[in-house]
Amino acid sequence: SADQTHAQTLAWIAGHDAGRTADTAHPYAITVNDELIGMTGAHRDDTYVPFEIGYWLSPDQWGKGLVTEAVSVLLKWLSMRGQRAFVSGYFADNPASGRVLDKLGFLKAGRRKAFCLGRGESVEHYDMARIA
């Protein structure tokens, strides 16, 4: 299966403290009534490049504006820390994710095939960028 393994997930979580210390990764849980329903985060390979903004949400929570709210708070926090440029993107067959980025001021910057771990294949992807 192409799905992320338990070990891969644990390794990702184990790297959170180092990423925060290095200012290269800032993941945050999205919760409702103390239940984990999704996540958002900012990641970059080094401190001289823009943060890439990512997010996911449990399908039963879609359409409520929760990701838009969570990413908006993350962007405000990063902006208060002096960050001005951000990148993100979405798979072409997920226009709702694109609408989230549109609402948050991201603009289309390109289209390409990108590997999707959950699908185990490359999928059409829109690159998005925002400069504040």
Image: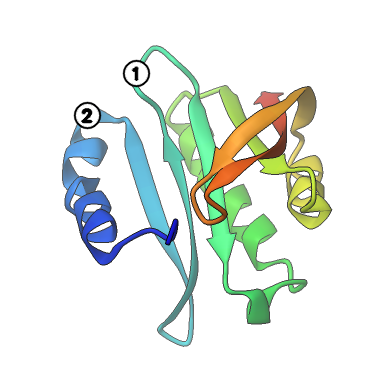
Q: Residue at x 18, y 46 (%)?
A: 17
Q: Residue furthest front?
A: 1
Mark 2, residues whose alpha carbon is within 10 Å: few (<14), some, or many (≥20)? few
Question: Along the horizontal axis of the image, is 92 left or right of 20?
Answer: right
Q: Which quadrant does the N terminus fall into?
A: bottom left
Q: Residue at x 73, y 52 (%)?
A: 97
Considering only order in the chain, which callout, 1 or 2, is on the residue closer to the N terminus?
2
Q: Which quadrant does the C terminus fall into?
A: top right
Q: Quadrant of residue 44?
A: top left
Q: Nearer the viewer, residue 33 or 124?
A: 124
Q: Quadrant of residue 104?
A: top right
Q: Secondary structure at mark 1?
A: loop
Q: Which residue is mark 1?
A: 47
Mark 1, residues whose alpha carbon is within 10 Å: few (<14), some, or many (≥20)? few
Q: Residue at x 57, y 22 (%)?
A: 84
Q: Is residue 77 above or below residue 95?
A: above
Q: Is residue 82 above or below residue 73?
A: above
Q: Quadrant of residue 130?
A: top right
- Give the residue type at disc 1: Thr
- Give the residue type at disc 2: Ala
Q: Is residue 51 above or below residue 48?
A: below
User: Is residue 76 something one can see in this rendering?
Assistant: no
Q: Is residue 47 above or below residue 123?
A: above
Is mark 2 in CB contact (under 8 Å) with mark 1? yes
Badge number at residue 22 = 2
Badge number at residue 101 = none
Q: Secondary structure at mark 2?
A: helix
Could you tell me how many numbered marks the image carries?
Answer: 2
Question: Along the horizontal axis of the image, is 74 left or right of 4?
Answer: right
